[in-house]
């Protein structure tokens, strides 16, 4: 019973908005906002307008480079990568006008009729897609690589934290890397306060890269059975 009452009330409310806006009485407006019998419910036509006025922007994909390390002296085979078409930002603007609005000649006219509902154009920006590129490198200069890749805003955070994990400083990778995850969790609040969002996103991949390099350059000794 309640649902049966709500729909007519919604239609009356929308009809009131349309009347207040004093929209021109052309055939396009009548098909989109009219109240005569035989038309789809006003709520349905208003929802169609909301979908039509939604513009979706997908930013240019972000490329993340992952380094795969090999021991010093190993042979690296170069592979010539196929050049891909550069991806660009994509903006999707709906253009399909509902069949019942056949008197609306183009997007502008249908949009104008939708404005009688109070529906205006709006833009939604979705998260940029991410692509991953893997490069191979010899595991040398691991500490220097890490310091170059980790934003300087994080240096003090690590320097203050590391002694509590038994590490002598940023250069003590033999201590830091086996404790990479707990140190990463513990330093998070400090770097969030000290760094920008983009810098925070760069810190942990950089530290992980440095420890990956260190692990290859300094492999754990293998036990030999007697």
Image: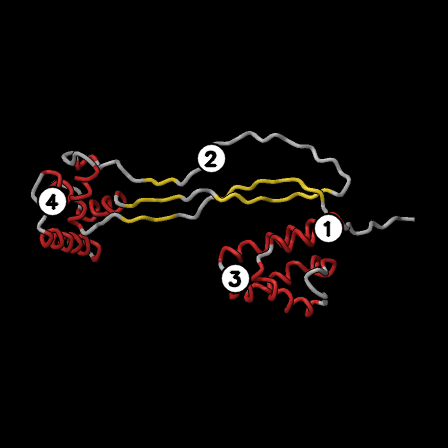
Query: Who comes first in sequence, dot 1 or dot 4?
Result: 4
Instruction: Tell us which disc is closer to us: 2 or 1.
Output: 2
Give the structural element (helix, strand or loop) at label 2.
Answer: loop
Residue with the mark numbered 3: 195
Give the structural element (helix, strand or loop) at label 3.
Answer: loop
Residue with the mark numbered 2: 86
Rendered residue at 40%/47% (across/down): 126
Residue 193, x across and y down, in percent: 51, 66
Residue with the mark numbered 1: 215
Q: Quadrant of residue 97?
A: top left
Instruction: State the separation of the CA atoms marked 2 and 4.
Output: 47 Å
| Nearer-the-camera pick, 123 or 13 | 123
Q: In the drawing, what numbered circle is on residue 72? A: none
| Nearer-the-camera pick, 8 or 176 | 176
Marks 1 and 4 in Cβ contact (< 8 Å): no
Query: Who comes first in sequence, dot 3 or dot 4?
Result: 4
Rendered residue at 53%/30% (across/down): 83
Residue with the mark numbered 4: 34
Query: Who comes first in sequence, dot 2 or dot 4?
Result: 4
Rendered residue at 43%/48% (across/down): 127
Give the structural element (helix, strand or loop) at label 1.
Answer: helix
Instruction: Tell us which disc is closer to us: 3 or 4.
Output: 3
Query: Who comes first in sequence, dot 1 or dot 3?
Result: 3
Tell me the quarter of the image containing the N terminus. bottom left
Q: Residues within 10 Å of mark 3 (few under 14, many from 20)?
A: some
| Nearer-the-camera pick, 32 or 136 | 136
Query: Who comes first in sequence, dot 3 or dot 2?
Result: 2
Q: Residues within 10 Å of mark 1 (few under 14, many from 20)?
A: some
Query: Who comes first in sequence, dot 2 or dot 1?
Result: 2
Instruction: State the separation of the CA atoms marked 3 and 2.
Output: 30 Å
Instruction: State the separation of the CA atoms marked 1 and 3.
Output: 27 Å
């Amino acid at each position: 019973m309640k649902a049966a009452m709500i729909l007519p009330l919604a239609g009356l409310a929308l009809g009131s908005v349309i009347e207040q806006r004093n929209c021109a009485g052309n055939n396009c407006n009548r098909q989109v906002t009219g109240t005569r019998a035989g038309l789809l419910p006003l709520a349905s036509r208003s929802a169609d307008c909301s979908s039509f006025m939604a513009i979706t922007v997908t930013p240019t994909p972000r490329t993340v480079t992952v380094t795969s390390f090999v021991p010093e002296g190993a042979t690296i085979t170069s592979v010539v990568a196929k050049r891909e078409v550069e991806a660009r930002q994509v903006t999707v603007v709906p253009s399909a006008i509902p069949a019942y609005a056949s008197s609306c000649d183009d997007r502008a006219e249908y949009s104008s009729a939708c404005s009688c509902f109070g529906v205006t154009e709006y833009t939604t920006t979705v998260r940029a897609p991410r692509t991953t590129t893997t490069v191979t490198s010899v595991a040398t200069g691991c500490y220097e690589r890490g310091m170059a890749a980790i934003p300087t805003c994080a240096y003090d955070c690590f320097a203050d934290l590391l002694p509590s994990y038994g590490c002598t400083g940023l250069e003590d990778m033999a201590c830091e890397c086996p404790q990479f995850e707990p140190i990463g969790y513990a330093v998070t609040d400090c770097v969030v306060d000290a760094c920008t969002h983009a810098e925070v996103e760069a810190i942990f991949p950089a530290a992980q890269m440095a420890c990956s390099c260190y692990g290859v350059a300094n492999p754990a000794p293998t036990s030999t059975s007697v």
